[in-house]
Image (spheres, rainbow, N blue to C red):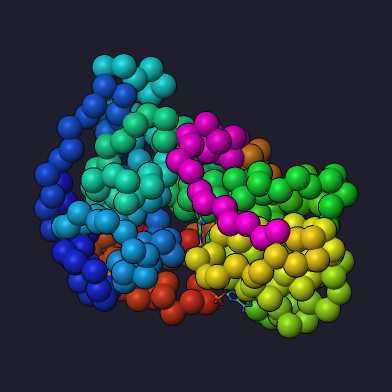
Amino acid sequence: MKAAILPTIGAPDLLLLGEVPDLPVGPTDIAVSVAAAAVNPVDLKTRSGFLKLDLQFPAVLGWDVAGVVTAVGEQVRRFAPGDRVIGMIAQPAHRYGTYAERVVADQELFAPAPSTVPLTEAAAIPLAALTARQTLGTLSLAPDARVLVTGGAGAVGRIAVQLLRHRGHSVGAVARAGDADDLCDLGVVWTGAVDRVEERGWDAVVDTAGLASSIAAVRDDGAFVSIDDNEQPRPQRGITPHKSYVDENGSALAELVAMIDAGQLRVPVARSYALADVARAHTDVAGGGIRGKVLVIP
Ligand SMILES: NC(=O)c1ccc[n+]([C@@H]2O[C@H](COP(=O)([O-])OP(=O)(O)OC[C@H]3O[C@@H](n4cnc5c(N)ncnc54)[C@H](OP(=O)(O)O)[C@@H]3O)[C@@H](O)[C@H]2O)c1
């Protein structure tokens, strides 16, 4: 099958279209013809070697996928050929990621695709939405808790903001000045730069932007969770910072899809690139400032 192949750790232009063998479909696996994959920060950190991973080369990057089921293993009951699905695979734990024509992985990693979003755009959902949901799941928030999200206009942050608002929380966001209107439309009550977080009024901070200093905004005995790879702030004032890492989970993904189809959650797409142009997609994402997910289309 065609795939964007990474021959070794290095710069974006190492990513070139090539051929890798098709994987066998195991008893609980489904094979998916890829409509789109999404580019995530973890792909850039894997490619550049920032994350020290035991990769097998040639590697195929990519965690997010949307596509159509083409074959199922003999024990698969949840899906059938022709089904439209989305899924997230933790790429380093699999032989090949999703920057490819086909993906083969366990049925439990997938959910039916939303019916209200074009299939290609649905590739934007899995990793960012699962991360936001699972990160919030690590917090014990009182119903009236006030929560500050750093990187509130980013992929994970924007979903965390929407999930928190859906649960009725008062939400603030550390974000660039240009994102204030968009976040205001999502019901955010305060936006600003991290050094403008003057008051320790927030019950919890969800740090998606790697801004350890945002712990200053948490009240005494409040909560601080980060998904970023930067160093954590030190424990202080009864706050014990912790990290959250996304897990593969098709059932949780199905619940997020239901929210999307109910109009309760939106995951915007910024740009799409042909799979052959994935090096350019990586360069552009590394430049920052893109709002919405970037897709690659095989
Ligand atoms: N632990 C996990 O399981 C997990 C899962 C998913 C993602 N992550 C990590 O979480 C981070 C966020 O991922 P993402 O996909 O949401 O990335 P993203 O879409 O790039 O979002 C990051 C957001 O933070 C903003 N930001 C960065 N520095 C800022 C600052 N000083 N002030 C205000 N805003 C700032 C960025 O704005 P600009 O674009 O303008 O810089 C961007 O809007 C990445 O490091 C990623 O690797 C971890």
Name which residue lies at 26% across and 17% down: 74
In the image, residue 81 sits, relative to residue 33, either above or below, namely above
Q: Position of residue 213 (x, y in %)?
A: 68, 76
For residue 282, which quarter of the picture?
bottom left
Image location of residue 169, percent across then percent down: 81, 51
Left or right relative to 184: residue 68: left
Count of numbered tags:
0
One can see residue 36 in this view: no
Q: In this picture, which residue range is highlighted in magenta?
A: 240-258
| Residue 258 located left or right of residue 250 | right
x and y, in percent, of residue 50 in the image? 37, 70
User: What's the residue at 32%, 46% (across, down)?
Assistant: 93
Which of the pair 166/264 is nearer the observer? Answer: 166
In the image, 210: left or right of 216? Answer: left
Q: Is residue 249 magenta?
A: yes
Indicate yes or no whether the magenta region holds residue 155: no
* Figure quadrant of residue 189: bottom right
> In the rendered image, is residue 24 in sight?
yes
